[in-house]
Amino acid sequence: MTLLARAHQGVNNIAKWPLICNRVHREYDESFAANNDANLFRGVFETFSAAEASAPTTRPLGYDNSAAAGMYMDRTRKSYPTDYPVMFWLQKLIAEGCSQFYDLGGHIGVSYYAYRRYLNYPATLKWIVHDVPAVIEQGRRVAAEKDRDGYLSFSDHFQDADGTDLLMAQGSLQYLPDTLPDRLKKLGTPPHHIILNLTPLHDRLSYFTLQSIGAAFCPYRITAILEFTKSFEALGYKMVDHWNNPDKSCPIPFHPDHSLDGYHGFYFNRIA
């Protein structure tokens, strides 16, 4: 158990003592509001808007700001254990002729840069990243220097996913005010393949929490796993693979039944 996990466990245990429960809640709220370098969670909410409304005013909301746009440069230079299932399936799909990738919430193209050291990108590759405006602006600046092959581009509209071979979302679905299946329904030709990774899912429950990423506060969606998979099956997708991300967790102090000790990854393909 990590030091941060032990600290959260201690908070949960102490909070059971009625005489100091309110004090512990207040102190955690103050730490959460002042946080600038840790990954923290607070509260359980029924809706995205309720989680958003609960955010302190000490940081911006969401990733659409310069501080959040400047994060994750380290991920362009190296891969992590959670990346390898994604690279495995990308390698197979590239070999099958897939070359148009839509990277939903791909930030500045972190996966594009990290994976090119391991995968043989085809000359026909079009890797399209969609994110919020501040991140896209930063991504275009970085690409002008780092994208030596010119395969990377940026999209301002989800409709640009229409007709692509593959949609991937790595740790981004939890930040959407709507769901990916709802967006896919609006496309004329949804991507044939979908790779999802770093997705927080609960065994039984669907809810929201509020995350502090240090630079900002973000409403954060957590979905019941069966509800999640059935929403893709309803659109004609078949689950080909499912893996765990055990090195990712979502500890929500005072809410142990809503905390997660691992995240999930999936590969779906569309039947006909």
Image (spheres, grey):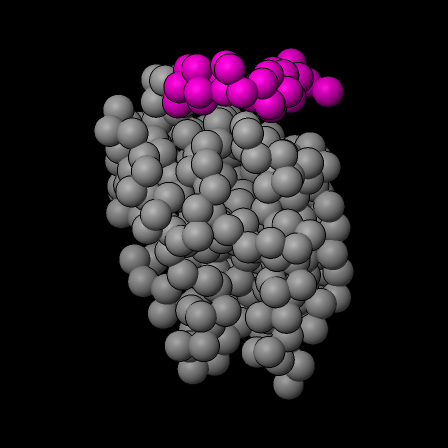
Which residue occupies 40% across, 19% down?
26
Which residue occupies 50% across, 69% down?
181
Which residue occupies 48% across, 32% down?
41
Q: Quadrant of the C terminus?
A: bottom right
User: Can residue 220 be seen by looking at this rendering?
Assistant: no
Quadrant assignment, res 198: top right
User: Can residue 208 be seen by looking at this rendering?
Assistant: yes
Picture coordinates of residue 247, whole percent (x, y): 69, 32
Q: Is residue 203 left or right of residue 40?
A: right
Residue 28 magenta: yes
Q: Quadrant of the N terminus?
A: top right
Q: Residue furthest bottom?
A: 272
Q: Is residue 6 above or below residue 196?
A: above
Q: Is residue 33 left or right of residue 43?
A: left
Along the line of sight, the residue nearer the viewer: 52 or 199 = 52
**What secondary structure is the stretch in magenta mostly built from?**
helix
Chain part drawn in magenta: 1-29
Q: Is residue 240 above or below residue 244?
A: below
Along the line of sight, the residue nearer the viewer: 201 or 186 = 201
Picture coordinates of residue 39, whole percent (x, y): 49, 26
